Amino acid sequence: MAENTFDRFSVFFTRDTVFLDGAAFPLGQLTTDILNLDGEILTEIDRRVDGFMSAVWTLLQEKTDSAARSAQERLNAVWDLIFDLPVYRSLRLDTETARNLLPSLLSDSAKWSETLDVDSEGHRMFEEFLSGLEYFSESLRNFRGQLDGMLELYFEPLSRRNAEAYAEAYAAYFTDMAAAGGLFFPEQEFSQSIPAQLCFVPTADPTEAGKVLLAEKVEFRYLSHLLYTDFYRGLMAGNAPRRCHNCGRYFLLTAGYNTCYCNNVAPGETERTCRKVGAHRNILVALRKSVLLLFQAGFINGIPLFQPVGQTIIERLCILQSHFAMLDNVRQHEIIGVAGFNLMAGAGVLSQLVIGLADVYALSIGSRISPVKRFLPVRPTFS
């Protein structure tokens, strides 16, 4: 029989990995998955738990088989959502017992009498089980809310992404939280402690046949406790969740890798990832900054940028394009800028430059730039 249950399960930690019954995850990935969880799922879990609690109260009053079956149906509706969440769906759970818990309990007269005895261990365990269900969604909301704030305010501004930088960011967070706690809750010291049972065991590496690992086997009572452990161990290993600057979902930065875009398909795209879309956006931003500097300078190779009398802006931009095309690579390199030149060299650079000039010009006079684009080559796409 599987040893894992909703409120008592074990995982294995190594230096940079957490194992859930053989499934390997980089430290921080479970946290990232929970951060991306649709909040409506937690709301629905709350709604189903409320229905279950009402049915349990009826069971405790009526003590009938029909009341036990009704309560169990409500509980199974809760399990349908919880057992499909990250972590639980990767554990071998004793679902048979979980989905027949109340009828089995009622049919065992000794266990049922102990459950009703307020001074017994069985009653205490039953109350803890109910309390864990009631607090389940709220504990995940608290976890997600704490990390949202910590990551946005203390980790997002970091210029480096490694264990040392994360330690400094967490030190700043910890100091601020301790100071705030001392101000508002002087009787309670701020801490991030997790109650758990820990032992060191040899275990077979599920990813490499014949290899043995020394691992920490940790037993948790609450999912949120595992998630805090996964998050902080991840920071120590140089891993941290980060919110994608394009789609807004979290992704895991591992081993100090620094990017602000995830590698999932971008919203509104069928193939291009957020990372690719973001790279193109950065190119255009850099190019338009360079174009703005050109306008501020006022000249390209001695040719005035501003519109002479008698010429339309379209005519002037086409002239600028032709003059730009005659410049040597060194001069073009100086004008566009190193990043823009390297990443946009080849077909389409000139049209991009002219469209950029038109954008800046339009912004400066408040006019529309769509007529300009009709006279220029199609804006190239980059792969």
Image (cartoon, helix red, strand yellow):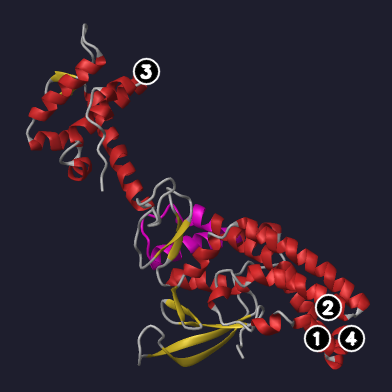
Identify which residue, 232 or 8, lies in the foreground: 8
**Amino acid type for the residue under numbered disc 2:** Ala
For the residues marked 2 and 1, what is the alpha-carbon distance in whole angstroms? 9 Å
Q: Which residue is mark 3?
A: 367
Marks 3, 2: nearer the viewer? 2
Residue at 79% x, 69% y is 52
Residue occupying image coordinates x 42% and y 67%? 239
Of the residues tagged 2 and 1, which is closer to the observer?
2
Instruction: Say which label, 3 or 2, has the lower sequence index.
Output: 2
Q: Tell me if residue 208 comes above or below residue 49 in the rendering.
A: below
Identify the residue position indicated by label 4 in the image.
117
Indicate yes or no whether the magenta region holds residue 156: yes
Of all residues, the one furthest to the right in this rendering is: 62
Disc 3, disc 4: CB below 8 Å?
no
Judged from the image, the secondary structure of the residue bearing numbered disc 2 is helix
- Mark 3 and mark 4: span between their CA atoms? 80 Å
Determine whether the residue tagged by mark 4 lies in a helix, strand or loop.
Answer: loop
Circles 2 and 1, Cβ within 8 Å, touching? The answer is yes
| Image quadrant where residue 92 sits | bottom right
Quarter containing the N terminus: bottom right
* Residue 51 appears in the picture as rendered: yes
Q: Is residue 276 within the magenta segment? A: no
The residue to which callout 2 is attached is 68
Mark 4 and mark 2 lie on one chain; the one further toward the N terminus is: 2
Q: Nearest the camera: 262 or 51?
A: 51
Label 1, label 4: how far apart the Cα atoms are: 14 Å
Question: Which residue is at the front of the view, 378 or 163?
Answer: 378
Tag 1 residue: 105
- Secondary structure mainly formed by the magenta segment: helix
| Amino acid found under the numbered disc labelled 4 | Asp
User: In the image, is 24 to the left or to the right of 320?
Assistant: right
Residue 120 visible here = no
